[in-house]
Amino acid sequence: MRPSPSRLLNILVPVKRAVDYAVKIRVNPQQTGIDTNVKHSMNPFDEIAVEEAVRLREKLKASVTSIKAITIGPPKALDTLRTALAMGADSAIHVEVPETQPAPEPLAIARTLKAVIEKQNAAATKPEDKIDLVILGKQAIDDDLGVTGQMLAGLLGWSQATFASKVDIDVAKNEALVTREIDGGGEEIKCRLPLVVTTDLRLNEPRYASLPNIMKAKKKPVEKLSPADLGVDYTPQLETLKVSEPPVRVGGGKVANVDELLAKLKEAGFP
Amino acid sequence: MLAARLWARQRALPRRVGFSTAALPHTSLNPVTEQDVAHFSKFLAPNSIISTLSPNPCAPDELETYNNDWIGRFHGQSTTVLKPKTTQEVSEILKWCNDHRIAVVPQGGNTGLVGGSVPVNNELILSLANMNKVRSFDPISGILVADAGCILQSLTDYVAPHNHIMPVDLGAKGSCQIGGNVATNAGGLRLLRYGSLHGTVLGLEVVLPDGRILDQLTTLRKDNTGYDLKQLFIGAEGTLGVITGVSILTPPAPQASNNVILALPTFDNVLPLYQTVKRQLSEILSAFEFIDRTAYDLAVKHGQGRALSEEDTKGAECFVLVETSGGRREHDEEKLNDLLELLLSADKPLINTGVLSQSPAQFISLWALREGVTEAVSKEGKAYKYDISVPLSSFKEVVDNTREHLRSKGLLHDKAVKYVLGYGHVGDGNLHLNIVADAYLPEIENALEPYIYEVVAAHRGSISAEHGIGAMKTHALPYSKSAISIELMKKIKQVFDPRGIMNPGKVLE
Ligand SMILES: Cc1cc2nc3c(=O)[nH]c(=O)nc-3n(C[C@H](O)[C@H](O)[C@H](O)COP(=O)(O)OP(=O)(O)OC[C@H]3O[C@@H](n4cnc5c(N)ncnc54)[C@H](O)[C@@H]3O)c2cc1C
């Protein structure tokens, strides 16, 4: 007889609405930021995080009791939550930030996530209602800061497995085996739950949202919260001085023969 | 005299272009000689001439990409490729060729699918690749004037920051040139929305076979001053002159685009689905493309776009890609959602399920499944491509009957025909019927032709909806064009090209 799982998994998946990666970024004329009046979609690493949560459920079946998506962002970030719900999350939380306010920084995000987790875990009457796994992108492609997951693990005092390319969870043993992407290969680590996992590109290929699931997603619950509800301060600690475009690439030239090439190299200061 | 010479030339041309083009000489046309190359080098830059002839012979393999067509079915034996940089240079080349009766094949991106862009024998190849500058763009009217050799994708990129798009889009956009598009009157994926090039091309600059430059490069939307000569060059496949400049109307870029792939349990649902989609989406519908199961599976097999999940494709006989483009995202999404809800909640649903792109990246990926079929087919084997117009309701019947016909001839197996598949532009009544074989075999060809052309003729359809006639279908022209039409076409050819130097063996036999 198989041992019955000692506990059940509740997964929290933070997702961010970001400028889509297929969009060409344009810096505004004041050089204070970028033109955000362009197509947005879910940060690709977060899409991978949602996919991984859904796959874990497909694999572990009933051991995964809940998958909850959460976003901290402007009203339009609700679209991003709907996508997560259409991909297979059960419910969602939207911590709404006014459109005009600057995007909250990673530490503020990590504090918000911590507050949400602690709130839910404190309210949990049974241990199996507690959130014990957070899966999130290793970075967002808009600001590329890449620290939220680590900060969250630090604040919570949880294990962390960053840049994951493979995640196996043994619910009964309360353990996860994670392969991390490191320079030149992979590193396998074993960690105890509760755990924060940040996703790398190779972890999986996210699914399309199917029509029936998109329709179902419309009926799934989305809880709305404000930063004040969670007692988190979003006052920025960083100041953006200037945003500029990368220098325009100057096209190459053609040379007729090797001699000309050598001459050009000399001209350019090569010995 | 003239008639006799034409007759002689026609006789000399291969009547039937097969797997490799037969090397029959044009009796009245001359091959390129060293003297000719010497003459060209007087006014062309050295890097505009690639020739195996003296004084600077290149390695024969340098000419390979120019002599062989995209599907690998047609092979020319040209010795010389010229890549002029200006209209004036094109004019001087043609004048010389006309005077010396040297046949010329205009070549764009060489992505044509009917063997029109490569020589039948040893004609001179005139590549437009070096004429690749945008001449002007008016962001208010959206009128773009460009050299014929501009690559379609680069023009798309050029107008994008001005919030415009090219009215034509097709799978070959990374290689094909606007001049080639015009010369083939390419249809493509946006025809449903923006109409054909006969409407969007406002003017052309054409070098006539005798070297004269016909400047019709107007940017007028209205110009009713007699015969509209430029129309003759649109779809002439380089048989009347060389297009060197194109003036084209680019529509404003839609502010919002969405797409969805729908999985259908049976082909019979495609038509009612088309009706429903048209009614519900009306002005925002911009594409309605059909892919049968075989085509879909091949696209997935050859890595064209991310596949749908097994659950979503289970029991699907075919797929439809619907694209919307409009001015306001919320409005379009509401319409699209209403449609999808209607489709899913119907008592007798027309669709099994479907997927809706959630991001521009997924949008591209869904399109790749449709656009990638052409490429997947060519990776899978040797393709016989029939691009036909037949009534929508007969799409599946035509594909299935062709498969059965091949089976009855004992040709449906690993070493002969591997797949028979259909995909295409439902909105335009255009079916791409593809037969994928292990190798080009005369038995297969004999089984397919005239069988398919007869089927098309029985439906009063077109034997070439958008790819043209090229070298591949000259013999089949009578299935779609009456004797009177063909006679008039020949007269027009004679008026423009009395010596028959322009792309001989193409379009007309
Ligand atoms: C992957 C793929 C997808 C395609 N999809 C479509 C599609 O959806 N719809 C469609 O209609 N077609 C399609 N095609 C075929 C289509 O005809 C060509 O891709 C394109 O229009 C040809 O452009 P090109 O520059 O490559 O011309 P080429 O192949 O070089 O030439 C085609 C013909 O035009 C002539 N020509 C070229 N340039 C000039 C010029 N400047 N002046 C005079 N004559 C010239 C040539 O002599 C030849 O007869 C597809 C092809 C591929 C490979």
Image: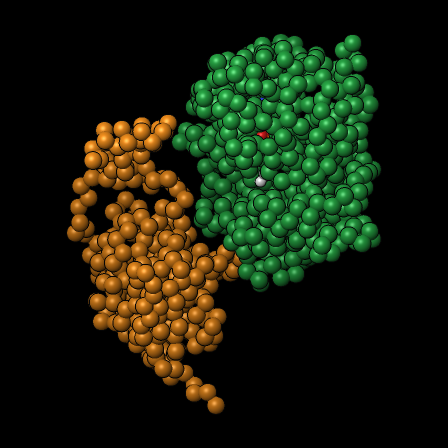
Residue drawn 63% across and 58% down? B352
- What residue appears at the point 58 percent right and 12 percent down from the top-left corner? B96
Viewer-nearest residue: A78 or A237: A237
Residue B188 screen position, x and y as percent: 60, 36
Drawing shade for chain A? orange
The answer to whether B258 is drawn above or below residue A3 in the figure is: above
Q: Is residue B402 visible?
A: yes
Please tell me in which quadrant of the rendered image residue B386 appears. top right
Q: Quadrant of ligand 1?
A: top right
Is B488 placed left or right of A104 in the picture? right
Image mark count: 0
Chain letter for the green part:
B
Horizontal side of B328 relative to B506 (left or right) equals left
Q: Can you say whether B393 is above or below B465 in the image?
A: below
In which image quadrant can residue A155 be found? Answer: bottom left
Indicate left or right for B271 with B111 as reference. Answer: right
Q: In screen coordinates, is A34 left or right of B177?
A: left
Q: Position of residue A47 (x, y in %)?
A: 41, 57
**Front one among B282 and A57:** A57
